[in-house]
Amino acid sequence: MTLKNWFFKLLGEDTRRRLWALALMILLFFFSFPVAAVFMGSGYWENKDMFLKYYRGAMCALVSGGNGWTAVLFAILPVIMGISSFSWLNSKKKVDFYNSLPVKREKIFFVCFINGILLVMLPYTFFLLSAIGIGAIKGAGAGMLIQTGFFAWLHFMIYYLFLYSTVVLAVIMTGNMVVALLGTGVFFFYGPIAVSLIEGYFSTWFYTYYQTDFFPVINKTSPLISYISSFQWENQIWLWAVLAAGLVLTAISLVLYKKRPSEAAGKAMAFQISKPIIRILLVVIFAMMGAMFFWSVRHNMGWAVFGLITGCVISHCVIEIIYNFDFKKLFSHKYQMAGSALFAIAVLCIFRYDLFGYDKYLPDESKVESVAIYMGGLDSWVDYGVLKPSKNKNDNVITNPSYSYSGNSGPGPYLWESEDKEDYLYKNMKITETEPVINMAKNGIEDAVARRKYSSEGNGGTYYAKMKGGSEKDSYLSIGVQYNLKGGKVVKRHYNISRNDNMENIKAMYSQEAYKLATFPVLSADNSVVACQWKNMDQVRTVKDQETAQELLAAYQKDLRNLTLEETRKEFPVAMIRFVTEEGLEQTNWEISMDTGTNYRSYKNKEYYPVYQSFTNVTGIMAELGIEEDGIADREKVSQVYLSDQRSYEDALGTWHDGKSKVLVDTQDIDQLLPALVFPEFYGFSNFAEENYVRADVSFTEEGEMYKNGNETLIVQVDKMPEKLKELIQYDQMTKAMDEARKLKNSY
């Protein structure tokens, strides 16, 4: 029998065996592509240009890799075709029949394997081309559709091979269809579950563990998750790696198929050697899951061990039933079950009691090249990101954000693309004078050790409230530290530190050039700046002379470098300023002309920096230009101020008490209050500012330029508030009553 004859003859026989699959593929892809293409092109459109614009977009979406329906099909079809391609391996009669054929086993394998691909690929290709042809005839553009369709075809078929070869491997390793499906589930989900569980152990029991995005790791442990994530990350190199992985799995399947004993048909597992390996891997994971579940419910080691043993015994027994189809075999491998339980207990103890000193890790300072730090609540107002063009060279929109622009105006020439603050700082910050950060890390390690001891003593509740006598929100800071070690190794840790105990360390770190250079991107701004914008409330004044803007930039950079942490704690800005490039100015002008709203992709309120009273270099230049901070504009038009303490508390009897309020109309009272008022927009620039609940609703006799509605709600700095006005709203009495109620509540 020639190569051509035996291949096509066996291929035909296998196709006749699976005519139902061919019919199913034809129906699915026929309705998914040509019928959909015709359907989207039907209907009445008065404007032909609008129709073509709509139809081009719809057809591109139909044939592209972003078609959700096609994506779902190519997640399900590999399972169906993988099971059906080698389902005959589960029947002793069919196995004997195939083995009796005068054809080598590897040839039979390739026929069944390749046909499982062709039965999907050929209908998909034919009907995809049909849809492209229909779209081209209707004016959707053949070239664009062919290019889009080809890359989608390549993406789906490579991942089809990857998923399909995984299912085939599961079928060959088993002798029963139900067990093959369970095996497919193990291949698809064991890796993600294991990685997620390990990450859960780290985040639960290691107090200095720095939680990172572990999805890229999960992506590499599961063919299915890799396929799902491929729609978010486009990487051609990764696509070829997936193709290589599919070919490797195919080769492994071929080797196992050749070694597969004929008597494996009808049994749960085809290879005896695989049974203990799979059993132990599954039992350990289920035992660890049981421990995690009961710990999350009771936070007690005894219950965690109970959950571990329960998960171990139940999973072991279920797997034995599946393996042997016999309830009498529940404990036929009790020593393996005991070993799995002991291993899981060892892992639990390593994490629970930090036996390897994870939380105590602190690199030798001589091995540290530099450090980077992220501190919650410190300079949290800074914007990180870039302006990117919203359209490509062909004038096609390349970004599809959610717009809140009025008039459905769509994107402007640019869109703001934000970058996560932590990622930005870790990438750009290189602090070489590491002593302040190392000192904070040492404090964080002491805190972690104390928290572990507190927890091991069976205490419940919040460590910070009961052990430290305060609350985490008021007294403690959450920081992340990245150690850049010599040799290129990077280590990250998360710490909770006392703000009061580390204030000197924070001040020393804040004064360093390396910290500010990474934290404030404006310090890296260069001659690309063409304009400057000065903002106070809703008023924006623009300096469009580039030379003056550059002078202001240099002055602001000097002031910002001299800024101390103490100034950011005690002062509030008098205005805001930003320095814009040609792109930023173009986008700003567009947003003003379109009267757009504000969303996370707009540039209207991005990249503004505070101007403090101590910034004499920049305020001096602005004063020469006739632009000064406005303060409370139209003072003479203030008619009254509604002063209110918005705090409230619940007493021991369950009765709620609200703060007092007072209307100020006396000119002297208003004049005394004005220096203590802060615009809400400026309050957020303060570092470590305590929550302030005193508000002043300022009313004007008529609408002003800054106050469009004739009134403005401002925040009152309590420490600058006159004692007379404090007494009017009984502020100190309210504070005392709240403290007494809090102490009484904590004593219960």
Image (cartoon, rainbow, N blue to C red):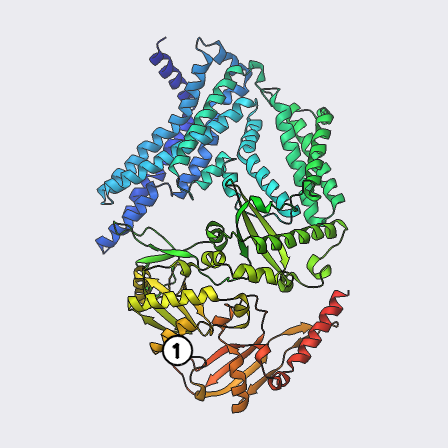
Between 106 and 710, the residue placed more toward the observer is 710
Q: Position of residue 381 (x, y in %)?
A: 48, 63
Q: Position of residue 238 (x, y in %)?
A: 42, 36
The quarter of the image holding the C terminus is bottom right
Q: Position of residue 727 (x, y in %)?
A: 64, 85
Residue at image x 39%, y 18%? 11
- Indicate whether 302 appears above or below 675: above
Q: Residue 338: which quarter of the image?
A: top right
Q: Residue 729: which quarter of the image?
A: bottom right
- Which residue matches tag 1? 628
Residue at image x 52%, y 12%? 96
Between 494 and 369, the residue placed more toward the observer is 369
Q: Residue 74: which quarter of the image?
A: top left
Hey, which residue is sitting farthest front in the picture?
366
- Indicate whether 519 appears above or below 626: above
- Indicate whether 465 appears above or below 717: above
